[in-house]
Image (cartoon, rainbow, N blue to C red):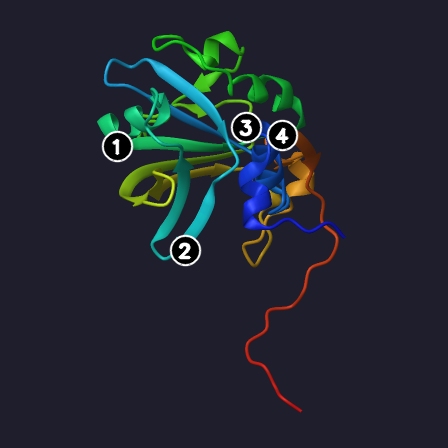
Amino acid sequence: MGNYTLNDIAKMDRRFRANLINAVSGIKSANLIGTCNTDGQTNLAIFNSVLHIGSNPPLMSILVRPNSVERHTYENIKSTGYFTVNAVNKKLIERAHQTSGKYPNGVSEFIICQIKPTFSDIHPAPYVAESYIQIGLKIEEEHHIRSNQTILVVGRIVELNISKDVVTEDGHLDLSQLDIIGVNGLDTYGQASKWKKMPYVSSASIQ
């Protein structure tokens, strides 16, 4: 087994270090974050940092990189207060990955990556029409991570669009039916599948 100290990590090639530290935490969800600015210009970006915060109230978060350069997703969330989280599936992988490119302000990733936006009557940010799990959120709060200047944006779920056929009686989702994709690191995608469902542990007994 290889051993890397903090000093070793600090000396690594920048790209190697980014790949290693992104991958070491395992498979994460791959989601497209949809926003628009105050002029209605749409924006779309792939994120692997969507995090469940709580269910009552229903809260999720995304981690945004430091504002050392233009961050259209973050700027749009701040100016309008809304964003969407859209699960990536097998049909979307190639086009979704292309949204990670650095496009000029005013260029919509929906258009350049050939992804169809869709809107609802109660949520102003664009959803991804091809996504089978669409989550509409309103910004609730944000937290600046002082260690590396990233920003944790917390949103409250105000709308959830998902096929009822994949929602089980106890509220779980069978993601395998939807061909949902996860990501390890920054560019390695794999399909989520159900292996085993364990019962809820209400209390622990010590023998």
Q: Secondary structure at mark 1?
A: loop
Which residue has dot 4 on it? 89
Mark 4 Cα-neighbour bin, 10 Å: few <14, some 14–19, many ≥20: many
Question: Which mark is nearer the camera, 1 or 2?
Answer: 1
Which callout, 3 or 1, points to the residue nearer the camera? Answer: 1
Task: Please state which amino acid type lies under the numbered disc 3.
Answer: Ser
Q: Are marks 3 and 2 in contact (CB under 8 Å)?
A: no
Q: Secondary structure at mark 3?
A: loop
What's the distance in space between the residues labelled 2 and 4, CA to CA? 24 Å
Residue 33, located in which quarter of the rendered image?
top left
For residue 131, which numbered disc appears in the image?
A: 3
Relative to 86, say whether 164 is above or below.
Answer: below
Question: Residue 153 appears at what percent x and percent y?
Answer: 34, 40
Q: CA distance from mark 1 to mark 2?
A: 20 Å
Q: In the rendered structure, which disc, 3 or 2, sits on the residue that comes first in sequence?
A: 2
Q: Are marks 4 and 3 in contact (CB under 8 Å)?
A: yes
Position of 199 relative to 7 (above/below): below
The residue positioned 60% from the left and 50% from the top of the image is 5
Of the numbered discs 4 and 1, the one sitting upstream in the chain is 1
Sequence-earlier tag: 3 or 1: 1
Q: Position of residue 142 (x, y in %)?
A: 28, 43
Q: Secondary structure at mark 2?
A: strand
Q: Which mark is residue 55?
A: 2
Q: Which mark is residue 81?
A: 1
* Residue type for callout 4: Asn
Element on which disc 4 rests: loop
